[in-house]
Image: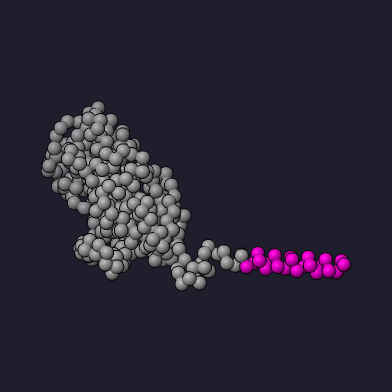
Amino acid sequence: MKKKLFAATLCLLLALTASLLSAGCSDDSGEDQAAENGQEATETLKVGMLGKDIKTACIILADSLGYFEEEGVDVQFEKINSLSDGLTAVSMDKLDILPFGVIPSCSFISQGTDVVIFGGTISEGSEGITKDDVEYTQLSDFAGKTIGCFRMETGHMVLKGLLREAGIDAEFVYLESSQAIVEAVKKGEVDIGMVNSGYGYVAEQSGAHVAFQVGDFESDFPCCRQTASRTAVNEKRDALVKFETALLRAYETYLNDRDAAIKALTEYSGQEEAYVEAVMYGTDSYDNAMIVSLDPNKKKVSDFYDVMKANGDIDADTEYDINDYIDTSIYEDALEALIERGEHADLYEELLKEFEENNK
């Protein structure tokens, strides 16, 4: 009797062990199942996001509308506290992508940090606000002016370079935030305040005046870029192409379905629809400064790197050439894939023409 009980128990244990081993072998993040179905395993990309900023409109839309999932890439958002923290995380492979800022990317690269700019997020976006209802229409208007700005704002560096090249003297005063800049303008402590990210619209609501956009003097200069780790570019390139493909589809939605875009961006940001529409599209009373652009725009990024060197914002004698840290092929491959699909091909063919002008 004891022998029969022992034999039955042993058989039960063996069956249970075999079952557990079988389950363990088949549950490897879905990779085995994907292989059996002839599908590629979904790769994960970790993307650094700064608060609820809607400059990353195409990323927000691609996530909200399910385009990342449809393209077969798992995009996970990670909160960052600052652009410098984000770039540091990218350089250490803790993040795959930072879609904000061009200043930190250029600064880190100038010091030898091996990260790669592979796409754009926003171009231009910089506004000059004043206390009085005045207009700045030519560079000579800035002579002798005091300009409040903060270091991580691209437009003031572009303006500083333009004034330097024109031989025009103006004083740039660094303040800690956009709100501090607006307050300095209101109190008459500075003649001009440099803001971006649609903050000109916010400033106007409190009585300030948008006197100019830096884009009036230098068109299509780079604002936020998409910067990836070298590891991601080397080991997750297919996932980056899928990521960019989803963003380009979201860009088509941004252009052609304003209601859907505003709804998604409003839900994401918690802002009012009026704010989202003004900042992303402009209104009859407010001319939005930000231009949504996913193009890496290698030529303009290289020009901006030179401006930063000439301004003294980075080492003028740096041995690191920015062109060695820009990969335009990911964006190009995504465009060509969408053109081959056929849907909205006219838009993507036009973007490909612009790409060739901006990067070749």
Question: Per the image, is 204 magenta?
Answer: no
Q: At x 25% / y 30%, what residue is drawn?
A: 206
Q: Quadrant of the N terminus?
A: bottom right
Question: Per the image, is 4 magenta?
Answer: yes
- Count of marks, rendered view: 0
Quadrant of residue 299 within the rendered picture = bottom left
Of 10 and 224, nearer the camera is 10
On the picture, is 68 further left or further right than 24?
Answer: left
Provide residue 155's location: percent of width, then percent of height.
24, 46
Please say if 237 is above or below 153: below
Quadrant of residue 148 within the rendered picture = top left
On the picture, is 216 further left or further right than 83?
Answer: left
Provide residue 174's location: percent of width, then percent of height.
29, 38
Provide residue 96's location: percent of width, then percent of height.
42, 57
Q: At x 24% / y 50%, what residue is drawn?
A: 291
Type of secondary structure dominating the magenta stretch: helix
Provide residue 352's location: percent of width, then percent of height.
23, 64
Please say if 284 is above or below 297: above
Q: Quadrant of the C terminus?
A: bottom left
On the picture, is 69 further left or further right than 188?
Answer: right
Q: Could you tell me if residue 206 is visible in this image?
A: yes
Q: At x 52% / y 68%, what residue is drawn?
A: 33
Q: At x 21% / y 43%, what residue is drawn?
A: 282
Range of residues picked out in magenta: 1-22
Please say if 186 is above or below 261: above
Question: Colour mode?
Answer: one colour
Of 245 and 4, nearer the camera is 4
Question: Residue extending furthest top?
Answer: 187
Q: Could you tell me if residue 189 is visible in this image?
A: no
Question: Residue extending furthest right?
Answer: 1
